[in-house]
Image (cartoon, rainbow, N blue to C red):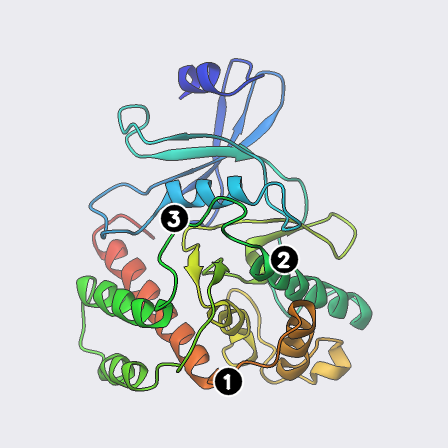
């Protein structure tokens, strides 16, 4: 890896120090520090047998590189290596962005005004992403235009079946329901696919996003799928990421779901999405399928 970086990353100085970040089981993530103290981040595919189209580090690299000159905050990308001979799996290297990763979306320790500002920034950045002209930034071939919801249901149904370990009747019912309730029409934008507060780096002191990270599921698709996934914290508590389902949001300063969606729609200049329940159900289904995939990799010894 040190030899590769010396040859492909301008300004890299030997020797190389490598440390792994906690989490990031889907695409293991590492801190690289060169001999001059410069920090980089490496994202690589995990070891072991992988599901088709999963762990797409090449697509992460492609979309972040394309967004570099837009008003969507992303880290600078340096190099993509698809030669497995270097470290065993494909990987890419990007800049290390110094800031805060907010894992608890209840935002403990902040004032109500600070919480509101951080949520407003999150919704605003998502709106900025969906306003980007994907053709103008060279992503017209990033994925197909139209039919996103149907493809998502098909893809995650197939991923779920491929990693299935137990019989879960609710998942089978959900597959049928989603196919029966497809939206009548949809628009196409760049979508992140896993947009949540934890997948962004905020300024050390201000409620400003410096970089949106973890683009593994990025594609062209229906922007309301991103928005719905971003709103799951209003419905689902998370032992690792907080619980706002039973608190007085106004007292906390956190916009409720209707207000958050309205802030997003104002940024984009659009009306509230129809078929909102479908998008929420699709997001929960994807989360279930992803969790099943991680669980199976755990049983096989390739994830915790």
Q: Position of residue 116 (x, y in %)?
A: 75, 70
Q: Position of residue 96 (x, y in %)?
A: 59, 36
Q: Residues within 10 Å of mark 2 (few under 14, many from 20)?
A: some
Q: Secondary structure at mark 2?
A: loop
Label 3 neighbour load within 10 Å: few <14, some 14-19, many 20+: few
Place residue 171 in its image quadrant.
bottom left
Residue 18 % position (x, y): 47, 28
195 with respect to 248 (left or right): left
Q: Label 3's element?
A: loop
On residue 192, which mark appears? none
* Discs 1/2, front: 1
- Please give the residue where the numbered disc 2 appears in the rendered image: 102
Is residue 55 visible from the viewing direction of this image? yes
Image quarter (top left, top right, bottom left or bottom right) of the N terminus: top left
Mark 3 vs 2, N-terminal side: 2
Question: Which residue is labeled 3 in the image?
Answer: 141
Q: Marks 3 and 1, how far apart in space?
A: 28 Å
Q: Nearer the viewer, residue 248 or 147?
A: 147
Quick one: 276 or 194, which is closer to the camera? Answer: 276
First in residue order: circle 1 vs circle 2: 2
Residue 103 visible somewhere in the drawing: no
Please tell me which of labels 3 and 1 falls first in the chain.
3
Gap in Å between the C-alphas at discs 3 and 2?
Answer: 33 Å
Which is in the foreground here, disc 3 or disc 1?
Answer: 3
Residue carrying label 1: 274
Which residue sits at x=54%, y=48%? 136
Q: Which residue is at 51% across, 21% downward?
A: 9
In the displayed structure, would residue 237 be above or below residue 62? Answer: below
Nearer the viewer's eye, disc 3 or disc 2?
A: 3
Comparing 224 with 96, the one in front is 224
């Amino acid at each position: 890896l040190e030899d590769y970086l010396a040859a492909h990353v301008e300004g890299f100085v030997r020797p190389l120090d490598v440390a792994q970040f906690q989490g990031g089981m889907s695409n293991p993530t590492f801190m690289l520090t060169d001999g001059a103290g410069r920090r980089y981040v490496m994202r690589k595919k995990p070891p072991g047998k992988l599901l088709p189209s999963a762990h797409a580090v090449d697509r992460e690299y492609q979309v972040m590189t394309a967004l570099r000159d837009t008003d969507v905050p992303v880290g600078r990308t340096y190099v993509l290596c698809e030669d497995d001979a270097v470290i065993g799996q494909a990987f890419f290297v990007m800049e290390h962005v110094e800031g805060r990763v907010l894992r608890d979306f209840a935002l403990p320790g902040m004032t109500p005004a600070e919480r509101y500002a951080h949520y407003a920034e999150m919704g605003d950045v998502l709106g900025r992403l969906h306003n980007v002209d994907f053709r103008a930034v060279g992503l017209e071939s990033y994925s197909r235009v139209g039919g996103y919801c149907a493809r998502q249901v098909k893809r995650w149904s197939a991923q779920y079946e491929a990693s299935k370990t137990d019989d879960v009747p609710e998942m089978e019912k959900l597959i049928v329901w989603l196919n029966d309730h497809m939206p009548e029409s949809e628009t196409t934008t760049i979508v992140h696919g896993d947009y949540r507060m934890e997948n962004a780096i905020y300024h050390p002191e201000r409620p400003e996003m410096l970089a949106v990270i973890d683009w593994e599921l990025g594609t062209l698709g229906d922007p309301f799928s991103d928005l719905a996934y971003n709103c799951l914290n209003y419905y689902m508590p998370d032992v690792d990421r907080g619980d706002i389902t039973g608190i007085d949001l106004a007292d906390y300063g956190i916009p409720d779901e209707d207000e958050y969606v309205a802030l997003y729609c104002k940024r984009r200049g659009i009306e509230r999405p129809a078929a909102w329940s479908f998008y929420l159900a699709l997001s929960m289904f994807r989360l279930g399928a992803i969790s099943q995939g991680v669980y199976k990799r755990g049983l096989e010894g390739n994830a915790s």
